[in-house]
Image (tube, rainbow, N blue to C red):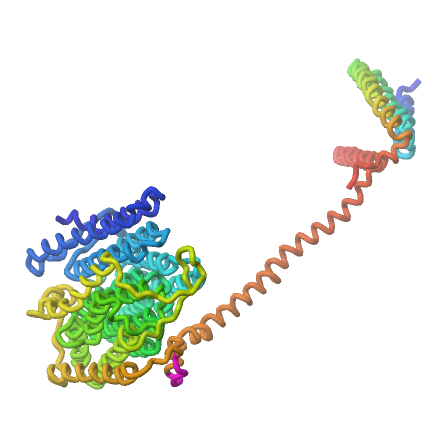
Amino acid sequence: MNSLIPLLVAAPLAGAALLLLGGRVLDRFGHWLGTLAAALSFAFGLVLFFDMLGRPADDRAVHVKLFSWIPVAGFRADAAFQLDQLSITFVLLITGVGTLIHLYSVGYMAHDERRRRFFGYLNLFLAAMLILVLADNYLLLYVGWEGVGLASYLLIGFWQHKPSAATAAKKAFLVNRVGDVGLSIAIMLMFTQFGDFSFAGVFENAPQASQGKLTAIGLMLLLAACGKSAQVPLQSWLGDAMEGPTPVSALIHAATMVTAGVYLITRSHAVFDLAPDAQTAVVCVGAVTLIFGAVVGCAKDDIKKALAGSTMSQIGYMVLAAGLGPIGYVFAIMHLVTHGFFKAGLFLGAGSVMHGMDDEVNMRHYGGLRKYMPITFVTFALGYLAIIGFPFLSGYFSKDKIIEAAFAKGGTEGWILGLVTLVGAAVTAFYMTRVMLLTFFGQKRWRPTADTSGSAAGEERMPHPHESPASMTVPMILLAFGSVFAGGLFTLNSSFLRWLEPVTGHSEGHSPLPSGVVTGLTIACMLAGVGVSYLMYGRGEVPVVPPIGSPLTRAARRDLLQDDFNHAVLVRPGSALAAALVYFDIKGLDGFVNGLAATIGGVSSRLRRVQNGYVRSYALSMFGGTLVLVATTLLMRSA
Amino acid sequence: MNPVNYLYLAALLFTIGAAGVLVRRNAIVLFMCVELMLNASNLALVTFSRLHGNLDGQILAFFTMVVAAAEVVVGLAIIVSIFRTRHSASVDDSNLMKL
């Protein structure tokens, strides 16, 4: 049975290799090949999952060694996989949602002539992400970490003919690189401290390490998580990443890759549990991002960017929960899984709306679409209810648990975190209701768009919204099922808690408020958010041209000035340094080399005059030379 | 007569030839001066042969004569052909081999 584990990765990897190297022969059925590879991987995952269910809780983790990767003297790094409860949860999420999104892309990318390449990249992403979650040591995890970064770069910039997409891809890659440096430093620290970077080795020896070292490792891991999961201060790339095709936004930038940071922190819980300072930093990052993303989400008119802000905010919830320690790990992962369902569903819904509206993304140009796209409307609405935490849908259970855990942290810290998460819940309800109302309700505010298809290219035409084909609606329906039932299923008998507890550990906190009060407060906040949003956007006309708004709104439209900040603090000094180095290079190094060349050239051009073409002068120099030779010979002999 | 005197004569002839090569412009005269230098060295070779009492120098003189004869044939042909095209036997007019 364990031999299936490498096949999990091998299937999408083979798919990617075939699709990217196979050539045009595969254009006709390549997309089905890619989908098949993803589905195959999902099937293997299911088999392994049921196999694991059949074993007792402490016997569920299995190791498979593939090969000895870097054997040097006494040191060994193996390419080895570890499949435990945490890994298999991710495997099922990645391959399950991945398969659905492959299926969706068949319809969404139907008219793109580079569709085969798109599916190749998607498969590459799946393979890298599976390596990331299956690795049994940090070095192999790093391979997957970089692999998903590459796939994300390729897919954000998939429409590279648009300069905005090409720039967004580069931005995502560069910002991620900052985080990757953090991960590599963390690995080096582990190596110097423990001489090993397998999970087992590091966690076993962690208690013997000094507090400072563990805090440093924890902070570096947090930096890595910030980069990959778009947390403050490395959050600026996620909004621009929406330039990629919508299925990519759904799979990579909502459901799976951006949650890798949460995985990293949860996986390294043994380190974080021993480094309270690093944990505090994690909680702070989560709390700040939670509010930051929510505020950005409120102001954006671009439907995908509003959802991106929401993703950032929800991952903030997860990071916050992961920073709470053993009381939060399980709920972080639970929210991660339910978020994977409803956010992927919301993105696919947004893609379906864009598909019907000629790729219009401005929500102020939507309105009244519920009659034209009934299936999209219903699935989107279910995802919406799930994310705002409507009672008994997925988000309700997972978010409520995180809020309870935040209060249970105890002390002033607990109160602050609890209030932040409650405010976050209210703001989430506000901006998601806004998206919902602007898109599906109210007046039609459609605008003609430039027609880029067919013979009438360049002419303007009104959009004719229509329901998307079955290959797109079926994944949306399935994800909507997940959005509705996953949370309840996980909470029933605390099944998810008991499932993950052997890996992450769990302890019940002591909440200053009874559980019922927290739940009531959460629902009250949610209703308040919905109500305010309805008052603002549900009644009367929504202006097509956005009003100027308050300074906060204007700042939020510009992503709370994150780019301006990065520009002023990092880009400007960076450019100045580069300019100084260029100056030094041109004037200093090049000056020396060029000066040397000019000197030699000048001397030669003067020496050249000696060669004047007169035979007699040549004869004279020969004669003179001979005389010198003879004289020297004679002198040497007599001496 | 002291054989060393022949060496003085050879040195004198060689100097005259070398000076001629350096100062004259007419290609034919230049050529004659080269011949003078060759013959001066022949004289020196024969003298040394006599001084040392063996025939090596004399044999070498024959080689020199053969080479000189060949050189004259080729050299005169070049001079004639240059004279035909440029109507001048001055070596200073053939100064194109320069930068």
Magenta segment? A546-552
Residue A423: percent from the left, percent from the top?
Answer: 25, 82
- In the rendered structure, the answer to whether residue A525 lies left or right of residue A119 reads left
Above or below, comparing residue A534 to residue A99 in the picture: below
Residue A248: percent from the left, percent from the top?
Answer: 31, 60
Does residue A501 appear anywhere in the picture?
A: yes
Identify which residue, A575 or A427, lies in the foreground. A427
Q: In terms of secondary structure, what is the magenta stretch mainly?
A: loop
Identify which residue, A170 or A605, lies in the foreground. A170
Can residue A356 be found in the magenta stretch?
Answer: no
- In the rendered structure, the answer to whether residue A78 lies left or right of residue A616 reads left
- In the rendered structure, the answer to whether residue B59 lies left or right of residue A88 reads right
Does residue A266 appear anywhere in the picture?
A: no
Residue B29: percent from the left, percent from the top?
Answer: 92, 27
Residue farthest to the right, as pictured: B1
Can residue A548 be found in the magenta stretch?
Answer: yes
Residue A86 found in image quarter: bottom left
How many dots with numbers? Answer: 0
Residue at 90% across / 21% down in the picture? B6
Residue at 18% across / 81% down in the picture? A522
Residue at 26% across / 66% down in the picture? A349
Identify which residue, A175 or B71, lies in the foreground. A175
Above or below, comparing residue A233 to residue A517 in the picture: above
Q: Quadrant of the C terminus of chain A?
A: top right
Identify which residue, A402 or B1, lies in the foreground. A402
Residue at 32% across / 69% down in the picture? A304
Residue B79 found in image quarter: top right
